[in-house]
Image (spheres, rainbow, N blue to C red):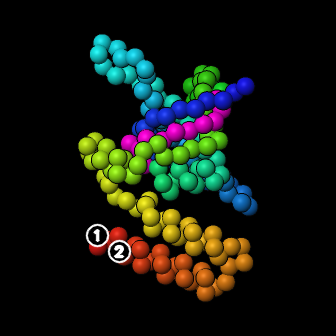
Amino acid sequence: MNKVVLMGRLTRDPEVRYSQGESPLAIARYTLAVDRRFKRNGEPTADFIPCVAFGKQGEFAEKYFRQGMRITISGRIQTGSYENKEGQRVYTTEVIIEEQEFSESKAANDEYRQSQGYSNNNSHGLDLVIIDYLQLMSGSGRTDSRQQEVSDISRALETARSVM
């Protein structure tokens, strides 16, 4: 059985790319800092685990995950190798995400981010959830009026955010 469950903080915002082709697939990469149970010389230590999320999981990470957030992930470990520019074999280990979720309240996350000096630009908050909901409600048989409605709401929310 190959199953891993981790809880930690994002070391930076996820890096997202999209595959080429007819239906591009989101590929989000991020590193999770996972505290070790024991401290070395009284100092906390952490392991830095590279993670990869594909498809909808990748899109979710892109929209909602930010540096410093505490999240919980589950997935599987995958190893691989490649040859670098110098012709040396490089071995890799990463977690392929199957599930990911928030591990603390938004208030606790905002407090932590503020204490660490991170930006609290909340461009990934409720407004995106509302837009996502409207897009889901419009379904695959979207009409021009529904698309216009989503576009109008997006512009209104963007304007509201800029004056806050």
Q: Residue 154 appears at what percent x and percent y?
A: 47, 75
Q: Which residue is mark 2?
A: 160
Specify the principal SS of the magenta part: strand
Q: Residue at x 45, y 68 (%)?
A: 127
- Quarter that holds the C terminus: bottom left
Q: Is residue 46 above or below residue 136?
A: above
- The residues tagged by marks 1 and 2 sit, at their Cα atoms, a distance apart of 7 Å
> Which one is nearer the viewer's eye here, 61 or 23?
61
Q: Residue at x 54, y 82 (%)?
A: 149
- Quarter that holds the N terminus: top right
- Amino acid at dot 1: Met
Which type of secondary structure does the marked residue at label 1 adopt?
A: loop
> Which one is nearer the viewer's eye here, 96 or 108?
108
Left or right of 147? Residue 102 is: left
Which type of secondary structure does the marked residue at label 2 adopt?
A: helix
Q: Is residue 51 above or below residue 151?
A: above
Q: Residue at x 57, y 25 (%)?
A: 86
Residue 83, quarter of the rendered image: top right
Q: Is residue 40 visible?
A: yes
Dots 1, 2 in contact, CB < 8 A = yes
- Amino acid at dot 2: Ala
Q: Residue 49 appears at what percent x and percent y?
A: 51, 30
Q: Residue 57 appears at what percent x and percent y?
A: 61, 50
Magenta residues (range): 66-78
Q: Residue 71 appears at what percent x and percent y?
A: 48, 41
Q: Which residue is mark 1?
A: 164
Q: Is residue 27 visible?
A: no
* Residue count near mark 2 (Cα–Cα under 10 Å), binned few <14, some 14–19, many ≥20: few
